[in-house]
Image (spheres, helix red, strand yellow):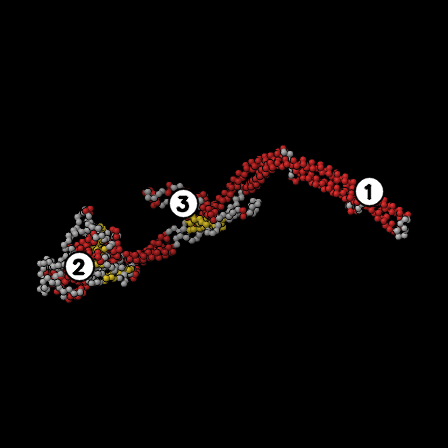
Amino acid sequence: MSVQSAAADVDVDLRQLFASLTRNWLRILAVALLVTGLAFALTWLATPHYRAETRLLIETRESVYTRPDGTNDNDKPILDEEGVTSQVEVISSTDILKQVAQKLDLSRLPEFDETADMPALSRLLVVAGLKSDPNEIPPEERVLTKMREKLNVYRVEKSRVIVIEFSSEDPKLAAEIPNAIADAYISVQGNANIESNSAATDWLAPEIADLSKRVKDAEAKVASYRAQSDLLIGGNNSVLATQQLSELSSELSRVRANRASAAATADSVRRALQNGGSLDAVPEVLSSGLIQRLRERQVELKANIADLSTSLLDNHPRIRALRSQLADLDRQIRSEAEKIMTGLMTQAQTAQARENQLVADVNTLKAASARAGDQQVELDALQREATAQRQLLESYLTRYREASSRKDSNYPPVDARVFSRAVAPSQPYFPKILPIAGAAFVGSLLLMAIVTLLQELFSGRAMRPAAGARFERIEQVAMPVAHEPPNHEPPDHEPPNQEPDIEDLGDRTAEAQTEPQAAAAAPATAPATGPATGDAVGPARRSLGEVEIDKAVEKLISSGAARAIFVSPEGDEAAASAVLVAREVSDAGLRVLLLDLTASGAASRPTLDSRLFPGITDLLASEAQFSDVIHADLYSDCHVIPVGNADPVRAMRAADRLPIIMQSLTTAYDLVVVECGPTDAQGISRLVGEGTEVFLSLLEPNDEVAQAAVELIESGYPELTLVTPVGYQTPRTPLPGRRSAA
C-alpha cells in the first residue's frame, strides 16, 4: 500500500509576524517615548556650541608699482591644488596655533585646559587612579589638543579659497580665534618673505664683492693680452692689421681699374691716329679743352669757306687761305691727340707701378692678419669670460638693489588675503533639540519594531508549514509476520493455527472502529501475557507487519528514508527500539542522528554518560546552538540530541520551530531517528516530512498498543510499521567514566 506524507518545508507567516507589532505596540511606543525623553533631556542640558568661519583667498598680491623690472604676473606661477592644500596644513600648523593661544591667553579658560577649573569629581577620579592626571601633560599641549578638536581648516573644492572654521562654547571666542589664525597666517607669510629678502641681501652682498673682483681681473687679462699681442683695435672694432689689409685691398682694386682704363683709352687713341680715323669717338680727346676750341675754329672756317664758295672760285686767294688755315687746325688736333695718348700711356705706367707696390703691401698685411686672427681667438675667449662675469655682476646688482629696497621699506607682498572675517554667531549649531529628539523617536520606533519582528521570527511563532507542500508516495517494505508462540491457544471463533482473514488496511481500520471488542479479542502475537491481551492486537500486528530491529534497519536503508519517527505507547522500555535502530543504521555506514523527545530522556540516557548535556529543549528555548546540543553516542558512530536542561514549558512555546530544526537536521544527516514516547498523531505532525517512516515500538501485545496503532492509521499513517526490541540486548544507561570505553 502507499500513502502521502507532508514535507517539512515551512514559510514565514507575514500576517502573524507583523501582527506582533500590533500586540506589542504599547511596549514599542513606551520605549520610543522613553528614548525621546532621554534625548530631549540630554540635549536640553548639553552645553551649546557656536561655530564661526573665516575665509582666505590665495592670489598674487604683487603690485605693478613694486614688481621688479622686466617681470609680470605671468612670470610668477599661481598655487595649484597641491599648493593650496599645503597652505591648509600651514594654517593648522603648531606654530600658528601656539601664537593664537598665547595671544588670546586660552590656557586660562577651562574649555581649553581642564586643569584651570577641574571639578571635584574629576579630582577624586585622578586621586583614585581611575583617570589620568591632565597635569602630567604640558599646558601648551593640552591647549593645542583642544584647539585641534574644535578647529577645521579645509579648501573649498575647485577653488583657491581656504575656510578656517572653529567651534566654541563662547560665541565671541568662536569668531576671534579663526580671525586670529588668519591674521597670524598672513603675518607668518609676510615675515617669511621679509626673511627671504634679508637672506637674499645677505647672500648677494659677498657674491657681488667677489664678482666685482673677478670682473676686474678678467678685463685686466683682456687688456694685457691685447697689448702683448699688438692687437690694436681700429675702426669698426676690428684689429688694425685686418682693417689695413681691407683698405689696401680696396686701393689695389681701384688702381688696377684705373690702369686698365688708361691703357685701353691709349690704345683706342693710337688706333685712331694710325688708321686716320675720327678722333671724335674717343671721350678723352673730346674732353680736352684745347681740342674743343680747335674744333670750334675748324667748324667756323668750314662755314666761311662754304659761304665764299658761293661767290668765289676754289683758286681764289681767300678760299685758298681759309683752306690752309683749316689744314693747320687738323694738324694741331692730331698733335694734341698724340699728347693725350702719351699722357694716358704715362698714367697707365704709373698705375702699374702703384699696383705692384700695393700687391707687395697686401701680401705683407696678409701674414700679419693671419697672426692677428690666431691671437684674436684667445682674446675673444678672454673677452667672453669677462662679459659673462660682468653680466652676472649686473644681474646680482639689480636683484640686490630690489631686495635691499624691500628690506629697507619693510614691504612683504603676501599671496593671500582675508575676504570674509568671522562674526560672533547668534545661534548655536549644537545641540539641535527638536531634530535630535525627532530622530531619537523615529530611530527608537524603528529599532523596537525590528527587535519585535526578530523575536517573533526566531521564536518560531511566525513560522508555518509551506502552502501546497509536496507529497510523495512511500512504498511499504513487506516484512514477515511474527509467528505466535506454540503455547498460545487460539480463540474459539478461529480455527487452530490459522490466521484471520485480513482485508485492506482501511477496511481493517473501520472494522477496528466498529467492533472494538472483537479487535480486542483478536491476538496478533501470543506472548506469555495471556490470550486476551494477545488477541487485542493480533489483527493489527498481522496487517501492519511486526518486524524485528534488523528488518526495520533493512527497510530504512532500502527505502532511503530521511526520517524515522518512533512512537512508544508502552513507555520508556519501548524506547529501546529507536536506540537499537539508530545504532544499527549508523554501523551500516550512514550518518545518523537520534533525537530524544521523551519527557524522561529514555532514548538518550543509554547513549550518554550524563543527563546534564544541553539538548532539544535548550535549542528550542534559544539557550544553545546546534553545535552545543549534538553529542556522540558512547557505543556507535551515531550522534545524539538529548532532552536537555531548559524549562520544558518555555521550550514547548517554540514547538513551531521543530519543522525548521528537522529540515536542518535532515540536510546534514542521512537519517534522523526521533523517539517521541507515548504520543499521538498530532504530536508527531510537526516531525513528519518528505521521506518519513513511522514506527510503533512494541514490547507486549495489549489494548494500549492496539489503540495507538489504530489512531495513527486513522490519522493518516496507514503504512505504520510495528517494531519490537524483544530478543535484542536492551541498551542500558552507561556508568560514569565509560566514555573512554566507547
Q: Is residue 221 above or below residue 699?
A: above
> Would you identify the image quadrant in which residue 141 lies?
top left
Q: Label 1 is placed on what type of residue?
A: Ser
Reading the image, the residue beneath label 1 is 335
The residue at 10%/62% (across/down) is: 497
Q: Label 2 is placed on what type of residue?
A: Met
Front position in the image: 721 or 214:
721
Looking at the rendered structure, the secondary structure element under dot 1 is: helix
Looking at the rendered structure, the secondary structure element under dot 2 is: loop
- C-beta proximity under 8 Å, tags 3 and 2: no
Reading the image, the residue beneath label 3 is 145
Q: Residues within 10 Å of mark 2 (few under 14, many from 20)?
A: some
Disc on the earlier residue, 2 or 1: 1
Give the left or right position of residue 110, taking residue 563 as reference: right
Q: In this rendering, does residue 390 appear at all?
A: no
Give the left or right position of residue 420, taking residue 249 as reference: left
Q: Tell us which disc is closer to us: 3 or 1.
A: 1
Q: Residues within 10 Å of mark 3 (few under 14, many from 20)?
A: some
Location of residue 354 in the rendering, given as x and y in whole percent from the top left corner: 72, 37
Q: Label 3 is placed on what type of residue?
A: Thr
